[in-house]
Image (cartoon, grey):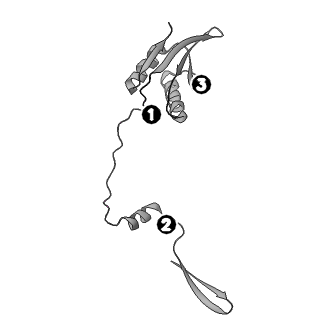
Amino acid sequence: MIVMILTNQGFETEYFRLKLKMDLQEQLKNLFPDHIKEDVVPSEQASGVWMQDDPIVCKYEKRKGKPITILEGYTGAVEDFKALAKELKQKLSVGGSFKDDKIIIQGDYRDKIMEMLKDKGFNVKRVGG
């Protein structure tokens, strides 16, 4: 506690002030004094992305004579889809981008990508060739 003495028209008044920044653990301890702290083991989810029922569409195109693989149809959060794109690019050691709710991977990696997504628990639909 901090004690402050203020003078207001000749009268001294004491104000007691609690700490401004009490950390979260102390606040929880004050709110729930009988709580027993337990270690929480995180659940085993493949990459922390949201799983969906609809299939992700995996298709092949050629742009400017170069092959690309396009993934679309993910209905979860945009950040999760971006994280999935980053993970796929790193595992395949290829370039790519995320545009207009689509993952664009340089090269024809449909089979590898479909296998990786199925291992994560996604439904994948192959479109074209």
Tell me where residue 79 appears, x and y as whole percent.
Answer: 54, 35
In the image, farthest residue toward the right = 9
> CA gap, disc 2 to disc 3?
44 Å
Q: Is residue 65 highlighted in magenta?
A: no
Element class at badge 1: loop
- Pointer 3: residues within 10 angstroms few (<14), some, or many (20+)? some
Closer to the N terminus: mark 2 or mark 1?
A: 2
Give the labeled residue for mark 2. Answer: 22
In the image, farthest residue toward the bottom = 10
* Cβ atoms at labels 3 and 1 below 8 Å apart: no
Q: Residue at x 44, y 22 (%)?
A: 55
Q: Residue at x 49, y 66 (%)?
A: 22
Q: Residue at x 48, y 63 (%)?
A: 23
Closer to the N terminus: mark 2 or mark 3?
A: 2
State which quadrant residue 26 falls in: bottom left
Give the labeled residue for mark 1. Answer: 50
Is 96 drawn above or below residue 49 in the view shown? above
Closer to the N terminus: mark 3 or mark 1?
A: 1
Tell me where residue 24 appears, x and y as whole percent.
Answer: 46, 61
* Nearest the eye: 104 or 101: 101
Element class at badge 3: strand
State which quadrant residue 96 falls in: top right
Kind of residue at disc 3: Ser
